[in-house]
Image: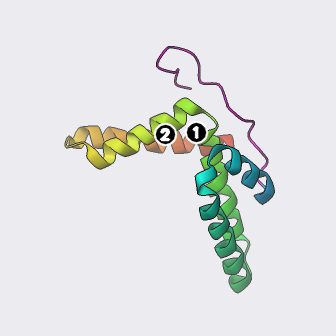
Amino acid sequence: MRPHDDGRPDHPTALMPPLTAGALRSAVASLLPDRLGEMADHLAEAVAQAERSGSTVPLRTFLVTWGTAVAIERLPARAARLRECERLVQESPDADVRRRAVAEIGTILDAARQEIGQ
C-alpha cells in the first residue's frame, strides 16, 4: 500500500464485503454514494442479460466490477492515486507520463481484483 502524503500507512475505511449484490450495495452506499444509481442500472442490465442468455456471466461481471470499485475505494490513498493517474492519462502532454500512469492504473486494478479473489 502507498502511504499517505504525510507518511501514514493507508488504512482501510471499511472492511471488504462479500461479493454479493446486497453487501456490495451497502459498501457502495457508504464509499461511493454518488454511484448508487449507476450500480442499480448495471445490476438491472446484468439480470436482463443473464435472463436472455441463460448465463450467469453477466451477474459475475457485475460482482467483479463493483467488488473491484469497493476494494479500491476502501483504501483512500489507493483511490486517490487511481484518480491522479486517470487525470494524468487525460491531461498530461507527456506521452511517457501517460504511459506510466496507464501502467500504474493496471497495477491498482490488479491489486484490487486480487483482493477480491479474481
SS assignment at label 2: helix
Q: CA distance from mark 2 to mark 1?
A: 6 Å
Say what amino acid the circle numbered 1 marks.
Ala
Looking at the image, is 19 positioned above or below residue 111?
Answer: below
Given the current orientation, which residue lies at the most extreme top position? 7
Pinpoint residue 47: horizontal percent, then vertical percent. 72, 75
Q: Residues within 10 Å of mark 2 (few under 14, many from 20)?
A: few
**Left or right: where 14 falls relative to 91:** right
Out of 80 and 37, give the one closest to the viewer: 37
Residue at the left extreme?
Answer: 93
Which residue appears at 74% of the width and 82% of the height? 51
User: Considering the numbered disc 1 on the image, is that residue within a helix, a strand or a loop?
Assistant: helix
Q: Nearer the viewer, residue 78 or 109?
A: 78
Q: Is residue 59 left or right of residue 103?
A: right
Q: Which residues are magenta?
A: 1-19
The answer, for residue 117, to whether it is visible in the render is no
Here the colouring is rainbow
Q: Is residue 48 above or below residue 86?
A: below
For label 1, the residue is 111
Q: Position of residue 80 (x, y in %)?
A: 49, 35
x and y percent of residue 54 in the render? 74, 82
Residue ID at (19%, 43%): 93
Q: Main secondary structure of the magenta part?
A: loop
2 and 1 marks in contact (CB < 8 Å): yes
Front position in the image: 105 or 37: 37
In this rendering, is residue 10 above or below 27? above
Q: Which residue is mark 2?
A: 107
Q: Position of residue 58 (x, y in %)?
A: 66, 70
Q: Quadrant of the N terminus?
A: top right
